[in-house]
Amino acid sequence: MLTRRKLITQAAGITTVAALPQFLRGAGFTMTSVDNSRSITGAGSLKAHASARGLLTGCAVSAKLFREDDGFRKLLIEQYNIVVPENCLKWNILRPTPDKYDFTDADNLITFAQTNGIKVRGHNFVWHEAIPAWFAGMVTKDNAEKLLVEHIRTVGGRYKGKIHSWDVVNEAIWIQDGRPDGLRTRSPWFELLGPEYLDLAFRTAREVDPTALLTYNDYGIEYDNEDNEKKRAAVLALLRRMKADKVPLDALGIQAHIKADSKDGFGKGLRELLDGARSLGLQVYVTELDVNDDALTTDDIVERDAAVARVYRDFITNALESPQVKAVLTWGATDKNSWLNSRKIRKIHPDRLQRPLPFNENYEPTAAFFEMRETFDKAKKR
Ligand code: XIL
């Protein structure tokens, strides 16, 4: 029988979209209309292949898509054993005014996940972005510590025992700011509290929810190139320093926003990062994987999907070499909703939608889906 996998493999060698079977052209296909659709759910799902290796696999969840689209909710149940709210736990969404929290979207997602046996990551307590508009006029060096501690106590406390891992601090390293330790200085948290904000956040998070695995999350640390090398070294030094100071820290999150056109590999540098995390006794999660294909010169969807899928395979294969890596999450599940499709990010081909995720806009599996499954199969059991 001609499986979809074979079709896609064959399709990778075909250059014109018109020569492809209808379902690979992305029109008129629904999961139920194809004979072998069952092969991608149940035992064929991402989560079945991942959990056979002791891995978690998941995606970021847009609150809007979650609310409005049962197809998306169905996909979450079928494919994933962990989810992370894309935005609704960020300050700007959660805290419309200084004294009001809006937990509606987060509560709904967490209840849904619990009902369906899906774990939840928390993203995030501290980030230099997603700061609410009221913050600037209200937060000072005198009240910032109280505000941060209260925030972590309120949000972490509400979901205590329900969160697999919290991204306690997101993206604290920014080499370009020029500090020897690489800490990002153009962040309200750094400006208000100095470098101590990190330890404060982690210690508070541990007090509030002792079972959540506390994670430091960052991007631009996986490639073999000079910029990533510098940032990776600074991240590892930060984690080492925190461990030495007995700051509660359980995991490193590698965002892995990677690119289809990059010439740099995931070799020595990624190994150094994973070995470094291992030597500190940290788990590692791939937290936000997606492959930006904006710079690809070809418009051919099959060629683009094949290029994206190759990068998925290359990155995940190398990452899963390390037994520390316990989870692989993509930033979104369907191209219908990817932050990479915001106009701001599609600079090179503004009129072309990106295809960075394991499902296309019709919830059909892309070539990346099949590479994810296969790389899980090839990984050693955790
Ligand atoms: C992005 C969301 O996907 C967008 O919807 C939002 O407008 C901005 O933030 N690194 C992170 C994520 O840690 O929180 C970001 O998410 C993507 C980059």
Image (cartoon, grey):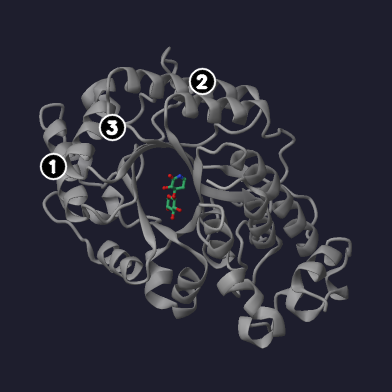
Marks 3 and 2, the one that precedes in the sequence: 3
- Residue type at tag 1: Glu
Please tell me which residue is depicted at 70% across the width and 44% down the height of the picture. Answer: 314
Q: Is residue 352 left or right of residue 93?
A: right
Residues at discs 1 and 2 in contact (Cβ within 8 Å): no
| Mark number, residue 188 | 3
Kindly state the secondary structure of the residue where label 2 is placed. Answer: helix
Nearer to me, 265 or 95: 265
Which residue position holds label 1?
A: 150
**Between marks 1 and 2 in the image, the one whose residue lies nearer the viewer:** 2
In the picture provided, is 363 more to the left or to the right than 126? right
Gap in Å between the C-alphas at discs 1 and 2? 32 Å
* Residue at the bottom extreme of this rendering: 33
- Whole-Å distance between the Cαs marked 1 and 3? 17 Å
State the residue at coordinates (22%, 61%).
103
Residue linked to disc 2: 233
- Examine the rendering and report whether any part of residue 48 can be seen: yes
Q: Position of residue 368 (x, y in %)?
A: 67, 58
The location of residue 8, given as percent across then percent down, is 79, 67
* Mark 1 / mark 2, whichever is N-terminal: 1
Report the front residue among 86 and 270.
Answer: 270
Quarter holding residue 187: top left
Q: Amino acid at mark 3?
A: Pro
